[in-house]
Image (cartoon, grey):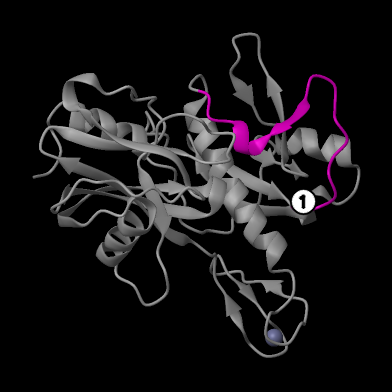
Amino acid sequence: MLQDLSYGKLEIEYHNPDPTPDSMVLCFHEGNILLRRLADDSLMLPTVAQAETWCKEDAAGKLRYLFRLQGIACYLWMGAAMEKPEGFSYEPARALRQLTSKDLCFGILTAWHLYTWYQNNRFCGRCATQTIHDDQERMLRCPSCGNMIFPKISPAVIIAVTDGDRLLLSKYAGRSYTRYALLAGYTEIGETLEQTVEREVMEEVGLRVKNIRYYKSQPWGVDGNVLMGFYCDLDGDDTIHLDENELAMAEFYPRSALPAHDDGISLTREMIRVFEEGAEPR
Ligand SMILES: [Zn+2]
């Protein structure tokens, strides 16, 4: 999956170190990120030294610590978008899932998650005062009423419905993503993850399930989620009643003839492969 980094995990723990000239800068602008695409199609972020040259203002005051990636501290650019320097371009952040710079892509998607959270919480939702950054934690604080605002992560489930040697695959309705997928949905307030699995399967395909077992999770900063993958067994009748607002199709496929393959990026694809190999939790 995308976050299975070759050198270890992204170091997300919050510290507040001062940037050094070779720290990396993530500068977003209208859904795009500033980067350099090299001849081998790998990606490179600008450094703090470069940002200081381009910005000519108090660049250090516009940097917010994010995490360490491959041992290098990364900062979010909090100022106005930088002009596009020679050799760099703005590319759509959500679309960056390529494998040549998988580590960097995961970093960018995680930074995007934090960027949108900072953007959406510049003012206190309780009293409308401008929020300030806390020095000790990754948190925004209201100086007027004391409201503490932590990063928002939305839990969602990915569901592999199995029936013996068959796996239920589906395709979304009305979306640009037209490949095979597993069922998925957000957890509602007051709901356990297992209840989310049961509800989503019933809503989307009208089936009952049992023997729900957890597989693995994946942070998915593109949409601010943490995805949790579950396998479950069909319980009873296999007649599918499709929610056509959500899905274009849903059908059981035999283990030996699954039309979707692991892309090394998504939990969904890994779960399909694991089922194909007969290695799913029982
Ligand atoms: Zn407030």
Q: Nearer the viewer, residue 271 or 256?
A: 256
Report ligand 1 position as a quadrant.
Answer: bottom right
In-image side of 150 versus 191 (left or right) = right
Question: From the viewer's perspective, is residue 226 above or below residue 274?
Answer: below
Report if residue 135 lies within the magenta region: no
Kindly give the residue lying farthest to the bottom in the view shown.
145
Give the secondary structure at mark 1: helix
Report if residue 89 lies within the magenta region: yes
Q: Which residue position is annotated with label 1?
A: 60
Q: Nearer the viewer, residue 102 or 218?
A: 218
In this rendering, the count of numbered labels is 1
Name the residue at 52% across, 48% down.
Answer: 221
| Quadrant that contains the N terminus | top left
Among the 4 quarters of the image, the one containing residue 119: bottom right
x, y percentage for residue 30?
78, 44
x, y percentage for residue 249?
41, 37
Q: Which residues are magenta?
A: 78-98
Question: From the viewer's perspective, is residue 60 above or below residue 87?
Answer: below
Question: From the viewer's perspective, is residue 213 above or below residue 120?
Answer: above
SS majority, magenta? loop
In-image side of 124 versus 252 (left or right) = right
Among the 4 quarters of the image, the one containing residue 151: bottom right
Residue 72 shows in the view:
no
* Local crowd size for mark 1, using a 10 Å CA cut-off: few (<14), some (14–19), many (≥20): some
Residue 106 shows in the view:
yes
Q: What is the three-letter code of the residue carrying label 1?
A: Ala
x, y percentage for residue 67?
53, 48
| Quadrant that contains the C terminus | top left
Name the residue at 27% across, 61% down.
Answer: 198
In-image side of 162 versus 71 (left or right) = left
